[in-house]
Amino acid sequence: MNTYEYLNECEKRLGNNLRQLREEKGYSQNHLASLCDMSNTTISAYEHSVKTPNLITVAKMAKGLEVSIDRLFYGDENSQFITSAEKKGRKIVNCIYVLWDLGILFFVGNALEVGQNSGATMSFSPLANSIRRLLHSLNDYRNLKSTYPDPDKYLEMLLSSVANEINDIIEREELEKKDEDARLKRTANKKKGASSSN
């Protein structure tokens, strides 16, 4: 791929990501344009790769969408990081890196573990259980693949099922953390109020 083709591909990706992120937020082109102090025709031109925004404009749009500039350029950063590699070996290494970086895969002694590594102790989260279940199901799938009427459909169903399960776990954990943060903040405000009244 020459430089021109690469830049053209980057423009298309940016336009697609801009439209997708805008729609995910439920914003119209007019609403995003007002947040970024530009016209809706300009937003449309960027989404359709008719015009290319400069870095300052990309930063304004990222701020308006409340995402990182990387997210606007690359979409889902982890997915792009994994899938952008051309060779399978690199995709595998990138995937393992993301799992390691998230604290899902790690070593205890010489054993590879799936879970959450918290220093000297290891706790197994529902996320780790989902990953273990997926790995066992994938092993079964490989061994029984020829017995399924539509192996590709079954595999997609399996992957989607575990992906949805993991999304639910992540959302639940984020909600619990938000609730805990709010509780700690209320407690701190009560203490602050009590000490200021003395």
Image (spheres, rainbow, N blue to C red):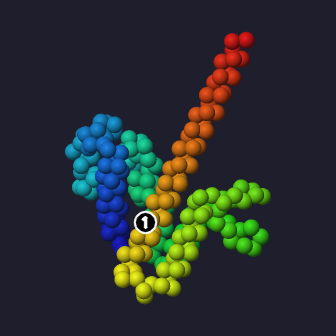
Residue under circle 1? 160
Q: Position of residue 157 (x, y in %)?
A: 41, 70
Give above or below for 40 relative to 74.
above
Give above or below for 17 relative to 105.
above
**Quarter of the image that includes the N terminus:** bottom left
Residues 68 and 151: in front is 151
Q: Residue furthest top?
A: 198
Task: Tell me if 73 is positioned left or right of 108 in this view.
Answer: left
Find residue 112 and report its image quarter: bottom right
Find residue 103 and report its image quarter: bottom right
Residues 119 and 173: in front is 173
Task: Tell me if 31 is positioned left or right of 183 in this view.
Answer: left
Please report the residue visible at 53 percent of the width from the left and 49 percent of the height from the top.
172
Give above or below for 115 relative to 58.
below
**Quarter of the image that includes the C terminus:** top right
Q: Secondary structure beneath disc 1? A: helix
Q: Residue furthest bottom?
A: 146
Please report the residue visible at 63 percent of the width from the left and 24 percent of the height from the top.
189
Please report the residue visible at 58 percent of the width from the left and 60 percent of the height from the top.
127
Find residue 132 and report its image quarter: bottom right
Q: Residue furthest left?
A: 41
Task: Tell me if 25 is positioned left or right of 99 in this view.
Answer: left
Q: Position of residue 175 (x, y in %)?
A: 53, 44
| Amino acid, disc 1 | Ser
Residues 191 and 78: in front is 191
Q: Position of residue 19 (x, y in %)?
A: 30, 52
- Residue 83 can be seen in this image: no
Please report the residue visible at 78 percent of the width from the left and 58 percent of the height from the top.
120
Task: Tell me if 9 is positioned left or right of 121 in this view.
Answer: left
